[in-house]
Amino acid sequence: MSVSKVDCAAVVRGKGGFVLSLYRHLAPVTVDAVTDALPLSSRAAVYPGMVTLLTTIKTGVEKQRKDYSRGDVAFFAGTGSVCVFLKNAQSDSPLNPIGRIESGLESLDAVRPGDVVQISKPSQEAVVQT
């Protein structure tokens, strides 16, 4: 277990799961806001090369950038959305980088608009056992 890295379990209802790692050093205030809001459940919006999850999280801009790789996760402060990149891309708007999909990215390749995605912290028992 790391002070900077927060592992999260996620499920695309009916399509599989994935492991998401959030990294505090990328955007500490934003990552803390996201982890405090867990568990999250949201319907997916699908764009070319990206899946977004609308949240109620309010945070400002932090260490923003526009270039992202497949599997990167960012937060769009303007709309409160968590964005997962399915291909290498350059965003039109700068986003706060917050993490990376560690495994199971193929379950997000199958996401369709309106699919429910749930993100949660792993159980304390799982953390103790590792």
Image: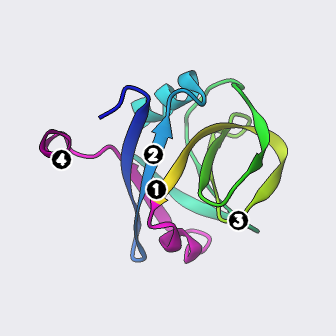
Q: Nearer the viewer, residue 74 or 58?
A: 74
* Residue type (three-letter) at the residue carrying disc 2: Ser
Residue 127's x, y, as percent? Answer: 20, 41
- Distance between the alpha carbons at the discs numbered 2 and 1: 7 Å
State whether residue 88 is above or below residue 3.
Answer: below
State whether residue 68 is above or below residue 23.
Answer: below
* Residue shown at 41% from the left, 29% from the top: 36
- Distance between the alpha carbons at the discs numbered 3 and 2: 18 Å
Please report contact status of discs 3 and 2: CB closer than 8 Å, yes or no. Answer: no
Question: Circle 3 is placed at which residue position?
Answer: 87
Q: Which residues are magenta?
A: 103-130
The dot on residue 126 is 4
Question: Circle 2 is placed at which residue position?
Answer: 21
- Distance between the alpha carbons at the discs numbered 4 and 3: 31 Å
65 relative position to 56: left or right: right
The dot on residue 102 is 1
The answer to whether residue 42 is seen in the rendering is: yes
Between disc 3 and disc 2, whose residue precedes?
2
Between disc 4 and disc 3, whose residue precedes?
3
**Element carrying mark 3:** loop
Binning the other alpha carbons within 10 Å of mark 4 as few (below 14), some (14 to 19) or many (20 upward) gives: few
* Residue shown at 55% from the left, 77% from the top: 110
Binning the other alpha carbons within 10 Å of mark 1 as few (below 14), some (14 to 19) or many (20 upward) gives: some
Query: Which colour assignment does the render follow?
Result: rainbow
* Residue shown at 32% from the left, 43% from the top: 121
* Residue type (three-letter) at the residue carrying disc 4: Ala
Please report contact status of discs 1 and 3: CB closer than 8 Å, yes or no. Answer: no
**Element carrying mark 2:** strand
